[in-house]
Amino acid sequence: MAKKELRPIDKVISEYPANSSNANPILQYFAIPLVLFGLLGLIWSIPFPQLGFLGKFNGFVNWASFVIAFSIYYYYRLSPVISYGVLLLVFAFSAGIVGLEKVQNNGGPAMGSVCLVVFMFGIAMQYFASGKEGSALSPRNILVSPVWLIYSIFKKTGLKL
């Protein structure tokens, strides 16, 4: 009997450190969104050049737009359903970041500074949630963490992947 080949999503999930016996999945559910929100906000805060051909849409395109597009494409290649879940998460984070920009423009703290604090807190939580395994903080695992989060939420709710 031939061995059943794993789907790309199953392979990625099986290699993610949150599946190790030392990991704390409850902390992961809080750490991953914090890391993602903070990282997205930090990338969003990098100045983007004004491009004439964008016209009135200049404020809607930034470096985070490219990161989001690349990430969603990668997630779509793993699993279309997972990519839709991550896209909804990114929409929510984007709304939060735009809200932070409005607070900044009204004299509040700098959006980039707030996102840096959120990111650092999320990284600290991720470190403790992963059983103090440094590999959980690698760039690849940060890219894969939203996949693990959405995958585990979908699996717990009984949604078909």
Image (tube, rainbow, N blue to C red):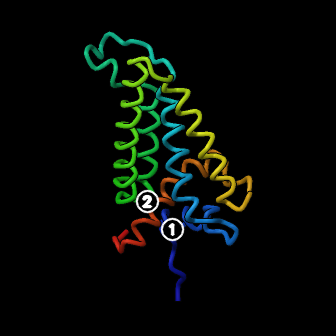
**According to the image, label 2 marks what residue?**
150
**SS state under label 1:** helix
Earlier sequence position, callout 1 versus callout 2: 1
Where is 67 relative to 18, above or below? above
Taking depth in this image into account, of 140 and 35 the one nearest to the observer is 35
Classify 91 as above or below 56: below
Report, in whole angstroms, how far the alpha carbon at label 1 lies from the one at label 2. 13 Å
Q: Residue furthest bottom?
A: 1
Taking the view exactly as shown, the residue that stands out farthest to the front is: 107
Q: Amino acid at mark 2?
A: Ile
In percent of width and height, residue 4 lies at 50, 79
- Residue flagged by tag 1: what amino acid is it? Asp
> Seen from this angle, which residue lies furthest left?
56
Residue 101, percent from left and from top:
40, 25
Instruction: State left or right for residue 110 relative to residue 160.
Output: right
* Residue at left offset 44%, top offset 52%: 75
**Marks 1 & 2, CB-CB < 8 Å contact:** no
Nearer to the camera, 48 or 3: 48
Q: Which residue is mark 1?
A: 10
